[in-house]
Image: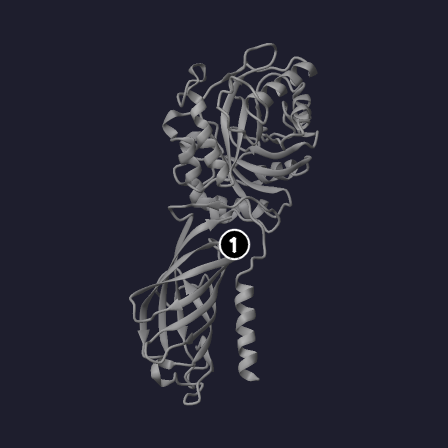
Amino acid sequence: MAGQSLVLLLSVLMVAMAKGGSHATGIGVYWGQDSGEGSLADTCATGNYAYVNIAFLTTFGNAQTPQLNLAGHCDPNSNSCTSLSNDIRACQSQGIKVLLSIGGGGTDSYKLSSAEDATQVANYLWKNYLGGHSNSRPLGDAILDGIDFVIASGTGEHWDDLARALAGFNQQKVYLAAAPQCPFPDAHLSGAISTGLFDYVWVQFYNNPSCQYSGNLDNLISSWYQWTTVQASRIFLGLPAADEAAPGGGFIPVGVLRSQVLPAIKGSSKYGGVMLWSRKFDDGYSLAINHGMCSTAIPSRRRISSHQPCNRLVLYFHDIIYNGENTSNATAAIIGSPAWGNKTILAGLNHFGDLVVFDDPITLDNNLNSNPVGRAQGFYLYDKKDIFTAWLGFSFVLNSTDYKGTINFAGADPLMNKTRDISVVGGTGDFFMARGIATLMTDAFEGEVYFRLRVDIKLYECW
C-alpha cells in the first residue's frame, strides 16, 4: 500500500507541474516607417511580438485618393508592395495579428468630412486590405486582421462613424485598435473609443510630458488608470523602444519598466501589454522586457520562436542532504530507500531506489551564501543499479525583483555526463506556460552531502 501511495503521489505531482495558473499578455510594434528596420517576415520571426501594425495609410477621406506610405520598403504605385502578402501570412501563421495603421502624425492628408465619407473609407479598407475584393489591393491578396487608428491631426469628428462601419462587416471579425495620446481624454479619438468597439487601445505614453515617465511614475500611473475606464477590451502601455525614438521623452529603461511600472499597472483587468514605437528602434528592448509582461488577469497570444530562445536565464541551486547530523542546514531528505538502505545514507549500487525530496535555495551565482532569488522544490530518484543516473521532477519557485513565478522541469539526469538537458514543461507568473530546455551541469559537490547545479534555461515558447 505504501508503494502504491507513493506512485500515486508522484503522478499527481507531475500532472500538477504540467499545468499553469495564470494568463499573459503581448507586445506589439509598429513596422513600415524605415527601410532599414528589416522585413515584415523577419520582424515576426523574432518571436517577440503578438501584434504588428503596418504603418501608415497616410492619405484618405474627403474625396482623396488613398495613399499607402511604407517609407522605402516598397512602392505601392508600382504594385511592389503586393509581395508583402507572403510576409503577412507568415506572421499570421505564428498567431500574430497584423493590422493596417491609418493616419499617423505630422500630416493633414487624412480627414473624414461626413458619416457618408466614413462609410466610403470603410468600404475602401474592406475591399483593399480586409476580407473584400478589389483588383488593386496594395498589399496583395493577404487579408489583414484589422485597422489601427493613429489620428493626430484634424478634428475628432466621424472617427466613430468609421469604427461602426468597419465593425459592421459580418464576413470577418475586424479587429479595431487606436493609438491615442496619453492626456485624457484624447482630442481626436475619444468619440471613437467611446463606441465600445475597440479591441486594443495602445496609449502613447511618450512625447507628452504631462503623463509620461520622466524619472517619476506618478503622472504615468494616474493617466493609466484614467485610460482603464474607457470602453475597450484591452489597454496597452505605448512606449518608445529607445530613447531616440521619442524626442519629446517618455523612454523607460528596462529595469524601471520591469521592477516599477509593470507591477503597478498589470493588475488591471484591462491590461493588455506593451506597444512599441517602432521596429526600427527595437534593438533588444522587447526581448529584455518580455518575461516581465505577464498578468494574472489577461489571456493573450503566445509567442513562438522557432530558432532563438525567447528568454534565457542561468541560475544555481544548492542541495544539502540530511545525513543524521546536519538538521539545521539540510535542504533535502531521503524519504524512500531500498531494503538495503536507510534514510540518512544514500544506498549502494549507485543509490538505486533512493527517493529524495528537496527545498533548495536558488542563487544568481555559484555562492551558497548569496541572497536567494527563490527555491528549487521537488524530488529526484536514482533509477538504475549499473549506472549513476537519476530522474528529476521539480520547480523553480522565484520571487525576486527580476523574476516572479514558477518554472517546472522534468526528465532523466544521466549524472556521469558533464552537461545534461531536461525539459521545461510549464510555468506560472512571468513564465506562464513556458516551454524549453534546461542544461544542467554539476558545478560542485562535497562527498554525498552537498552538490551545486548550474541550470542554463532556454525558453522557446513564451506567452
Q: Which residue is mark 1?
A: 433
Q: Where's the N terminus, which quadrant?
A: bottom right
The outermost residue toward the bottom is 340
User: Where, by quadrant of the figure, is residue 75 drawn?
Assistant: top left
Is 423 in front, or is 128? 128
Q: Is residue 365 left or right of residue 185?
A: left
User: Does residue 312 sit above or below 394 in this rendering?
Assistant: above
Colouring scheme, one of rainbow, by chain, secondary structure, one colour:
one colour
User: Where, by quadrant of the figure, is residue 41 drawn?
Assistant: top left
User: Where, by quadrant of the figure, is residue 102 drawn?
Assistant: top right
User: Does residue 329 sit above or below 170 in this rendering?
Assistant: below
Q: Name the spot of residue 82 as percent of width and height, x first.
A: 45, 23
Residue 278 visible somewhere in the drawing: no
Q: Which residue is pictured at 55% across the width and 84% down the height? A: 2
Give amino acid for label 1: Met
Q: Name the spot of residue 350 as percent of width and height, x first.
A: 34, 80
Q: Name the spot of residue 358 as percent of width and height, x first.
A: 46, 73
Q: Name the spot of residue 11 as percent of width and height, x first.
A: 54, 71
Is 236 in front, or is 115? 115
Q: Which residue is pictured at 40% across the width and 25% down the height? A: 34
Q: Is residue 183 left or right of residue 384?
A: right
Residue 288 visible somewhere in the drawing: yes
Q: Which residue is pictured at 45% across the width and 43% down the height? A: 254
Is 212 in front, or is 457? 457
Total marks shown come to 1
User: Does residue 221 sit above or below 157 in this rendering?
Assistant: below
- Circle 1 packing at 10 Å, graded few (<14), some (14-19), many (20+), is many
Query: The residue tagged with tag 1: helix, strand or loop?
Result: loop
